[in-house]
Amino acid sequence: MIDANRPELTSWLSVSQDSDFPIQNLPFGVFSTPSLPAVCGTRVGDFAVDLDALQRLGYLEGLGLPDGLFAQDHLNAFIACGKKTWSDVRLRLSQILRSESSFPLEKNREHQNQCVHEQGAVRMHLPARIGDYTDFYASREHATNVGKMFRDPENALLPNWLHLPVGYHGRASTLVVSGTDIYRPNGQRKGPNDPAPVFGPSVKMDFELEVGFLTGQGPEMGDWISTKVAEDYIFGLVLFNDWSARDLQQWEYVPLGPFLGKNFASSMSPWVVTLEALESFRTDGPLQSPEPLPYLHQPKNSHINLNLEVALAPRGEEETVISRTNFSTMYWSMAQQLAHHTCNGCAIKAGDLLASGTISGATPDSFGSLLELSWNGTQPLQLKNGTERRFLDDGDTLILRGHAAHSGIRIGFGEVSGTLLPAKAWTA
Ligand code: MN
């Protein structure tokens, strides 16, 4: 058992029973306050803890960390230190913040004033400067549903799908942190029965329920990361909403894949939950048949038993939960995605983001997009306020939540939310 994960640990900071952030979580993120420029931090309960202040006060001595490692508005330098450092820092944070700590912070008010902030008083930022972003398509149920709708119900999965994790290169420039408003995109669309394409605001705005992971510093270009060691290169996980304009996507995607229907915005949760914190929630994924090629050999316990839910809140109204599913339903694991991504020598840098693709379960109440939940608009969803949705309306807020739980321990992600604003009036 990893010491920082021991279920009996409690913190001297108060943590409510249903918190996603007990002392066994200790995620990493970046926050600022009106008087404090952005720094790297961790979270316990409803408190954000400033790692730069901890380091300056000597609490992180003996770990061999460079000065100022956390005095930055991104985690990249810390991520580049590698797995042993991630683990050493997490253990030290546990030792500082646990009840009956041998470190003086528990008793030292002056130090607490410098290091500990109420979560409600801080502003969260993107946790990393994400150099590259790749999106996969790793849910068999999602790929099957989309194949049925857009291609051929009899041959919903394309011939490559069961042999490799299909993915595409996304765009890092429009990744945003939870709470950022999203403009409905303008673009070109043409439905199958329209006589000609038109330009204007998307009329099929959607979300995608995904989980992403930030990568460590990979080997040099030309080398690869095998499934055996892939998890050493996974820093941590985030919830990820890959906003999608289905009408733009359907018209543009052949033959080179997603483009403007996807790259206008993707939102991520601010606290990166380490793979180590999720260690006791590991499980096997679905049986893979046909067996993948040897370079994609699946390690045991490759998946995480992570409960996910999607809520939609019309402007000023209460939310309706529109989907519940589990991350462990994914056909291709994170290790397989990383191994496949690098098998050709593609370089991976500290703070790159790899996202899972839409996570859909087997039943209609577990689908991870409105495209599937409303079956391309043919079966509208009923919301609590009496309205219905085929796709997103302007003013809708979309919220993803996720947590793993068993034996009284709950490790969660908080949420990623975003509100859809009307399209900007387009002028040449
Ligand atoms: Mn996606």
Image (cartoon, rainbow, N blue to C red):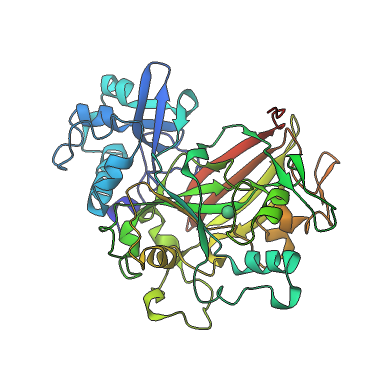
Measured as percent of width and height from the top left, residue 283 is found at 46, 68
Would residue 69 be found to the left or right of residue 123 on screen? left
Q: Extreme top residue here?
A: 35
Q: Is residue 346 visible?
A: yes
Residue at 20%, 27% (x, y): give it: 56
Measured as percent of width and height from the top left, residue 241 is found at 58, 46
Would residue 16 be found to the left or right of residue 294 on screen? right
Question: How many tags in the picture?
Answer: 0
Q: Is residue 304 above or below residue 412?
A: below
View quadrant of ligand 1: bottom right
Q: Is residue 23 above or below residue 211?
A: above
Residue at 60%, 54% (x, y): give it: 258
Q: Is residue 374 above or below residue 328?
A: above
Residue at 67%, 68% (x, y): give it: 362
Would residue 117 be found to the left or right of residue 222 on screen? right
Q: Is residue 6 visible?
A: no
Q: Quadrant of residue 42?
A: top left
Q: Is residue 417 above or below residue 381?
A: above
